[in-house]
Image (cartoon, rainbow, N blue to C red):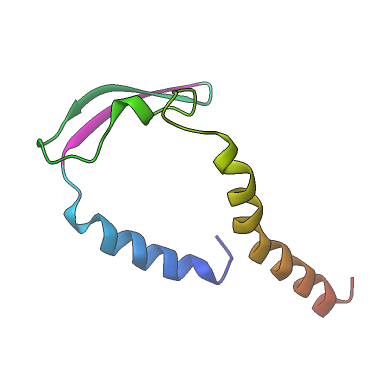
Amino acid sequence: WFHPLKEDLDAFIEQSQKNVYGVTKVKLYKGNITIVERNRPDSSLFYPEIRSIKAEGFDQRWCANAAKVRGLPFEILAKRNRKVKGK
C-alpha cells in the first residue's frame, strides 16, 4: 500500500478492467477460493483447465523466479529506506 508503484498499479487495473464483464460467485474458506457460479459471455478468456495451480495446465516452476524478480524492487526500496533512516 505504501510502495510508489501502487498509484500506477491502481490506474493500470482501472484501465484494464474497462472491458471486464460477467458475474462470478465465489466461496472463500480458510485461505481457499472456489468458483461457485460463473455467468459470462462466450468471448471469455476463462479456461477451467488452468484455473488452479494444481492443474496440469499450470507449471508451478514458473512462479519461483517470477516471484524473486517481482520482489526485487521492494527489497531495494527497503534497503534504501533503512539507509536513509540510518538503520
| In the image, residue 63 above or below residue 79 | above
Q: Which residues are magenta?
A: 22-29
* Residue 26 forms part of the magenta stretch: yes
Q: Nearer the viewer, residue 56 or 73?
A: 56
| In the image, residue 19 above or below residue 23 | below
| In the image, residue 10 above or below residue 62 | below
- What's the residue at 26%, 35% (across, down)? 46
* Residue 80 forms part of the magenta stretch: no
Please give left or right for residue 53 compared with residue 85 in the image: left
Specify the quadrant that holds the C terminus.
bottom right
- Residue 64 occupies which quadrant of the picture? top right
Specify the quadrant that holds the N terminus.
bottom right
What percent of the width, then of the height, locates residue 19? 17, 54
Please give left or right for residue 60 compared with residue 42 in the image: right
Which residue in the rendered view is the most extreme toward the left?
41
What percent of the width, then of the height, locates residue 17? 25, 55
- What's the residue at 70%, 70% (across, down)? 77
All told, the count of numbered labels is 0
Q: Nearer the viewer, residue 16 or 29?
A: 16
By secondary structure, the bulk of the magenta-drawn segment is best described as strand
- Residue 83 occupies which quadrant of the picture? bottom right
What percent of the width, then of the height, locates residue 42? 10, 35
- What's the residue at 58%, 65% (across, down)? 2
Please give left or right for residue 22 compared with residue 9 in the image: left
Which residue in the rendered view is the most extreme toward the right?
87
Which residue in the rendered view is the most extreme toward the bottom?
84
- What's the residue at 30%, 26% (across, down)? 48
